[in-house]
Image: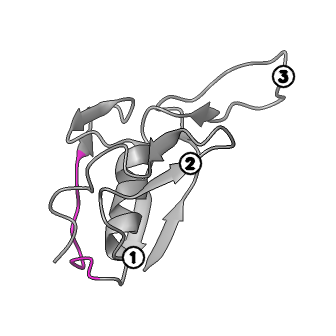
Amino acid sequence: MIVMAGEFGRTPRISHLPQYYALPGRDHWGAVQTVFFAGGGVKGGTVIGSSDRTGGYPATSPQTPENMAATIYETLGLPRTLQWRDAGQRPHNLFDAEPIAGLMG
């Protein structure tokens, strides 16, 4: 599986912040991002979710980083009950969310 993702998208509107930048532009924006999955059983050409009219916020099927991680773990064949233990031997679940529905073939 190949996964391409960044930690942010771009602002839905052009920013004018003359105290920081000489020219207008688009700043970092975490509310809407694009992630690309290929291989590993992913259905090619599948689009999951959409943004609002301005590209500012999720409109349908919002996902989280935990959903992305669960999708990767599922593809690797890791059981959803898998846990790891910290230095104090406290158990922590590896899966903190469900894999992205509709992405896998």
Kindly identify the residue that appears in the image at 50 percent across and 28 percent down: 13
- Circle number at residue 76: 1
Task: Return the x and y of residue 40 as percentages of the image width and height.
Answer: 34, 83
Quick check: 68 left or right of 88?
A: left
What is the secondary structure assignment of the residue under circle 3?
loop
- Circle number at residue 20: 3
Q: Are marks 3 and 1 in contact (CB under 8 Å)?
A: no
Most extreme residue toward the top, as rendered?
19
Q: For the residue marked with disc 2, what is the amino acid?
A: Arg
- Residue sitting nearer the eye, 25 or 75: 75
In magenta, the rendered stretch is 41-49
Earlier along the polypeptide chain: callout 3 or callout 2? 3
Q: Residues within 10 Å of mark 3 (few under 14, many from 20)?
A: few
Q: Residues within 10 Å of mark 2 (few under 14, many from 20)?
A: few
- Circle number at residue 85: 2
C-alpha separation, residue under disc 3 versus residue under disc 2: 45 Å
In front of the other: label 1 or label 2?
2
Kindly identify the residue that appears in the image at 17 percent across and 56 percent down: 101
Q: Residues within 10 Å of mark 1 (few under 14, many from 20)?
A: few
Kindly identify the residue that appears in the image at 42 percent across and 38 percent down: 32
Q: For the residue marked with disc 1, what is the amino acid?
A: Leu
Q: For the residue marked with disc 3, what is the amino acid?
A: Tyr
102 in relation to 29, above or below: below
- Please indicate, yes or no, whether residue 105 appears anywhere in the rendered image: yes
In front of the other: label 3 or label 2?
2
